[in-house]
Structure formats: C-alpha cells, structure tokens
Amino acid sequence: MENKNKLYYQDPYIQTFKAKVVKQEKDPTGNWYVVLNQTVFYPTGGGQPHDLGTIANKTVMNVEEIKGEIRHYLEGPIDDTGKEVRGTIDWDRRLDHMQQHAGQHLLSAAFDNLFGYKTIGFHLGAEMLTIDLETEHLSQQQIEDAEALANQVILENRPIETKWVTEEELSQFNLRKETKVKEDIRLVIIPDFDDNGCGGTHPRATGEVRAVKVLDWERQKKKIRVQFVCGNRVVTQLGKKQTVLLELTKILNAPEKEMEQAVLRLLETNKTLEKAFEQTQGKILHYEAKNLLGKRIQNERLLVCEVFQNRSIQELQNLARIITTEDEAAIVYFVSENDKRLQVVCARGQAGTESMKKVIASVLPLIDGKGGGNDLFAQGGGEAKISGEQMLQQLLEIKG
C-alpha cells in the first residue's frame, strides 16, 4: 500500500541513496527541480519541514510533493541526467525533525489522555514547536502533568510503530483524531498510549526523543497555544538560557536563586531614580523659565524668545507652558537646532489674542515643515534650511 519510491517511509534512518532521474525541468518561476524514481528526501507536509542535502553534488533547496510527484528543487540543473545519481540528506536536520515530530505526538497524546484536550494545530519551527489545544483554560499543574507523562513514556522507550491501513480497518484503532485522507492511510502507533494518522518521519522508539520541555503558553481566542522543544533542542535551549543566566548573575552580583529578587530591587530602584529625575528636571525647567522671563522683550507685546541647541520638542513645550502659566500676557517663541532639523514652539498666555496656529503655519513653509496646534499653543518641525536665529527673526516680524 505504501509508495515504494518513498524510501523515508521504508526506513527513516537511510541517509544516502542512488536513484535515476525521471524528469528535470524548470518550474514557472524559473527554479530547477528533478523527480527521481526513488528518494530519501522528505517533502514538506503534515506539519513537518522538508529535508535538505545534495543530489549529484547539487544543493537541494526545497522538496515538495506536487501533482503526485516529489520535486527536488536544486541550486542548478544536473549536467548528466542519463546516469544514476547519488543523494545525501542532512542527517542532523532529519533526526531533529524526527525527534520533534514524535515528541509532539507524545505531548498531544498526554494532554488528550489526561484532560481530553484535543490538538487542533501544530507547527514545527526552526527553534521550537507549538501545538494549539482546543480549550480556553490551562493551568501550570496541567502543563507539568502532561509534560511528566510524555517524559515517562520516553523513559519507558516504547516502540514507535507505523502501519498502513484501509479506511475500513480504522475502526480497530483508538484514533486521537480523524484522518484527513481516505486511502493509503498511515498510522503512527505508540502502544497503549497513542494511535494517530501521520505522514511524518519518526524514530524507532520513544527513548530517541530524549525529552520534552514546555517553554511557554498563551491563550489565543478560544484555544491555548503551547510552545515547547524536544530532543537535542532541549539541550540547546538549556545551554542558551544557562549562558544568559550566568552573565546576569555576574552583572547583578546575585546567585541564581536570588536572581528574581535582585531584578525586582533593580527595577524598584530605577523607578525611584526616574521619579527623582523627573522632579529635578521639573525644578530645573522652572528655574530656566524664571530666567527667561527676566530676559523678556517688553514692547507692544511681552515676548520670551530663545534659540536652543539639541532640545527635545517635549522640553520646549513644557518650558513654554510654565512661562505662559506664570505670566498670562507672555508670548513664547522657542526654536531648537537639532542636527539638520529645526523644532519650533509658539505659545501665549490667556491674556493674549494672537493665534499661535496661524503663526506656526506662516513659518513652517520656510523649512518644509509640518506641525499644528491651536490659538494658545502650536508646534512643528522641518529641515534646517535657515538658522535658528533666522527662524526666530521671522517669528518676531509676524504681526498678530
């Protein structure tokens, strides 16, 4: 019943093989591919990514099953298609996919057997896997119980069997979910634990999965997405996290067990410092406002004008608000030269009648600027096509 040309089903541990080229063509996008009379290369499908490797010393970029044929996309065409070619898969990648896929079966079956939570989605990524559980609620204890059960079955090193069956024969098995296909049905069976229709590659026994470790989970609409790793990825993740943790113990000068408290203390200290800085900054701005009011220009209008270097628009706005609150008759024109840009703030107190919105609109075209505001307060910015002093002079010449 199984397709004889799919060597990865006959033995997923085959790494090299010889085959004849049945076809070599370009697809509509211009990519070369070959079809062989038999192959070890697994095509993308069933949630499992394709194999990589070489065929006739050409790098295999992608493998897809299209219109009943397995297409091996290569970096370029094979020179001599008339002779037998040799293929080799990237074994580390294949073994990783086998471990991850079998581990997913174990974890999904554990959630199903313990709590009746069905897996309705599965993704095997480059670094981690996810399954989507058909439930809106999940607890830490349930995660730990499912993980422990999956790892217990791994420790027992139960065989992982594959069997090709007909639709009529399915009633003999306790399937975790209905099969999508109706013929050439392939079951992956872990005795007394899980029967599941699957077209992926798996190891011979659960022990080769090594371990399953849940990393995180989150609620997504009416399902729970669980993030986890299996096999060699568990060791890799531990190594990465341990490296980060050791660096943090040095930086924070705290042992691993006290890391959380050390970070919390640091965050609390940072909040305190930020609050103190804001208060100090506020006091400095008030002193600066009083100093600027002392330099105001008194004529038919009470003007407070200044050109600054590298001041944020937020600082200029705060400073202008303080001044117009202190003196309701004041008009404030602030310009800041920031690298190759000019920032402009115009404000007036409640006693004035001028429209700051109109003032800013009249000068922004000089710097190809954008901005806006209202009669009391307006701001904008643009390219430094003129100097800050020239901009200030333009503002002073405007009649309200």
Image: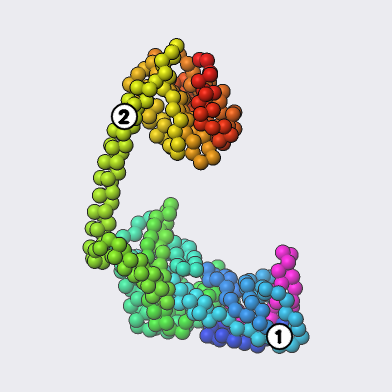
Q: Residue at x 39, y 79 (%)?
A: 210
Q: CA distance from mark 2 to mark 1?
A: 84 Å
Look at the image and tell me whether residue 165 can be seen: no
Q: Is residue 41 magenta?
A: yes
Q: Residue type at mark 1: give it.
A: Lys
The picture places residue 272, in percent across and down from the top left corner, at 25, 45
The picture places residue 312, in percent across and down from the top left corner, at 43, 37
Q: Residues within 10 Å of mark 2 (few under 14, many from 20)?
A: some
Front residue of 66/23: it is 23
Q: Is the image coloured rainbow, by chain, by secondary structure, or in one colour?
A: rainbow
Q: Residue at x 23, y 58 (%)?
A: 261
The quadrant where residue 76 appears: bottom right
Q: Residue type at mark 2: give it.
A: His
Q: Tell whether label 1 touches label 2 (CB within 8 Å).
A: no
Mark 2 / mark 1, whichever is N-terminal: 1
* Badge 1 element: loop
Q: Residue at x 26, y 41 (%)?
A: 276
How many numbered marks are there?
A: 2
Direction from residue 309 to residue 70 in the image, left or right? right
Q: Residues within 10 Å of mark 1 (few under 14, many from 20)?
A: some
Direction from residue 12 to residue 39 in the image, left or right? right
Q: Is residue 27 magenta?
A: yes
* Badge 2 element: helix
Q: Which residues are magenta?
A: 22-42
| Residue that numbered label 1 is attached to | 20
Quadrant the N terminus occupies: bottom right
Front residue of 302/258: it is 302
| Residue that numbered label 2 is attached to | 286
Look at the image and tell me whether residue 80 can be seen: yes
The picture places residue 344, in percent across and down from the top left corner, at 49, 30
